[in-house]
Amino acid sequence: MTHQATRHTLAVQGIRSETHHDIQALLREHGIAHLKHQAGYIPSQDESPLFAPVIYEQQHTLHLWRLREIHHMLQEHPPLALEWVMSLCAMKRQVPDEMIPYYLRLGARNQALRPWIKHILSDRALWLIEQAQDSQHAWYKEGKTVTINTLVHSQIEAYSEMIYWINHSLERDAMSHSHHKGIIKLMHFRLMWTEQITTRFLEALIVSHIVATYRKGSQIEQTIATQAVYKMPLHYLPDLLQELETGVVEWQATIDHAKEVFKLRQTMHTILTEAS
């Protein structure tokens, strides 16, 4: 193995090392190899085949420094990830290859993001998975990659059902003393909200018994409102804040959280606009 190949092997091993002891051993091994090279030692040749390169045409990507800013947001507010990856798909943008491991880990943690993430990674993702042979990235090779149009079409039925529940419970429960069933179902609704869902949600806050409930600091309604700031169209957030601010003191933490997410989503959309 040549001196250069030795350095390359040590670098690869160093990436895989996880303990301080392993790093010390690698540095010691590299030092010995360096001394042998200076003394004129000629190592045996390593005839092992190198990794086959991947050849592909990468689409438009975002700047790395902007992506790191986004990733910091996603670390602090994981629910923003759905809007982020869906927006990249809508703009037909891919992330730089340096960020492929990050999005593979993101998909491993969140199954709902997987079909969208497959559209924002280049062909090098599959190449990397085959070389690394990491079990947590196996999801990327499972099943067929569904087109974006198919993903969007599959949401229509879910949106229709959600609208039905909100409308139905508004008609039957507006004057009752029970929780608003249609709004409660939004807690388990994983998709981004449409304008129609958002409008009916805001109406429900005003005209149904949920208003009286959240004024008392109900945990259920606070949870739904917290989810709403991540999922409703951005231009509806001022209306939501105005409605929440009519509540009691117990809601101040939820209001402050909504304002923070509002600013983060504005920043995210600014970055997307710059990349368009």
Image (cartoon, rainbow, N blue to C red):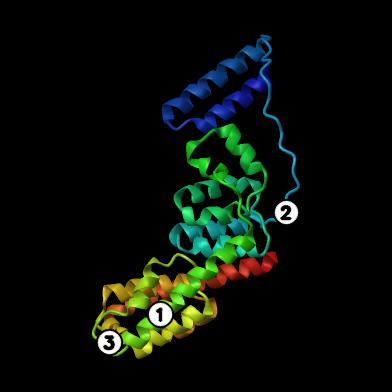
Q: Amino acid at mark 1?
A: Ile
* 234 in relation to 40, above or below: below
Residue 253 in view here = no
Q: How far apart are labels 3 and 1 at the CA level? A: 18 Å
Give left or right: position of 63 versus 263.
right
Visible in this render: residue 3?
yes
Q: Residue at x 69, y 55 (%)?
A: 61
Numbered badge on residue 93: none
* Tags 2 and 1 touching, CB below 8 Å: no
Write down the residue under mark 1.
Answer: 166
Dot 3 amino acid type = Ala
49, above or below 256, in the image: above
- Frontmost residue, 149 versus 223: 149
Q: Nearer the viewer, residue 248 or 170?
A: 170
Crowding at dot 2, Cα within 10 Å, few <14 / some 14-19 / many 20+, comes out as few
Quarter occupied by residue 85: bottom right
Disc 3: which residue: 212
Residue identifier under label 2: 59
